[in-house]
Amino acid sequence: DCCVTGLLGRFRPAVPIRKWELEKGNIWDMCRLTEPYVRRHLLEAVFKHETDSIISRFFDPLPQGAYRFRSHVDTERKIETALALEDTASDAQRNANETLKSQLFSFVANVILLTDPQEADGYHFRITMMTTTSYMELPGPWKDFLYKLYVNYFYERQDALWRDKALDKLPMMRDSSDMLVCGEDLGMVPECVSGTLNTLSIL
């Protein structure tokens, strides 16, 4: 388990994006999309005068002003472990530590796509990818193509799979109790949701 927050999580089950689909949009650099996008100007915007100190602690330099996390801090879980404080730490130290952890987490999550561990050419979109500087600094044609694919991924591509899974699982939940079952909107609502709930007489 390498995650602490949910930004690098994905729905399961889900129909992945395939590499050939990305290539149709002339998107070829998978490392650019799947690895944390860390550039000096982004580090300076966050860490100000502490940038060089932060780089020496957590990053290795790459060509063209890019950086990658060192192997001992290249996941949220590893960062949390590396920044663990003693019980005797002061409140000020704990507050500063939490701020640094949050800042480093934001760079770990500065990706567009998540690789599928079960399928070699499968990818899943990082939720709210449009808010990342990784996305903002992509070439315009790549941004446009990826946005359309993002909408397809979350609002269209999964409909049949999720409907079938819901029709398989929700009746068991509904029939296990005499209570009135209702669904609550806690985020994105794909097209299949309303019709499926109506079919099952779930509010």
Image: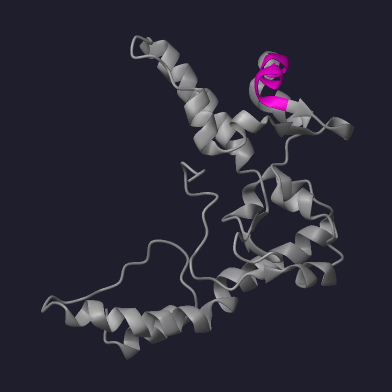
The answer to whether residue 79 is left or right of residue 49 is left
Q: Is residue 141 above or below residue 131?
A: below
User: 121 or 37, which lies in front?
Assistant: 121
Give the residue at x 52% y 43%: 2
Q: How is the image coloured?
A: one colour
Residue at the outermost left position: 178
Q: Quadrant of the C terminus?
A: bottom left
Quadrant in the rendering for residue 38:
top right
User: 74 or 143, which lies in front?
Assistant: 74
Give the residue at x 67% y 48%: 111
Quadrant in the rendering for residue 61:
top right
Q: Is residue 149 above or below residue 34?
A: below
The answer to whether residue 177 is left or right of residue 20 is left
Q: Residue 71's x, y, as percent?
A: 65, 32
Q: Residue 164's x, y, as percent?
A: 44, 85
Give the residue at x 70% y 51%: 34
Residue at the outermost bottom position: 199
Q: Residue 174's x, y, as percent?
A: 22, 80
Q: Residue 21's x, y, as percent?
A: 76, 72
User: 49 or 58, which lies in front?
Assistant: 58
Numbered range of the magenta stretch: 51-59
Q: Is residue 30 above or below residue 50?
A: below
Magenta: main secondary structure equals helix
Q: Is residue 60 magenta?
A: no
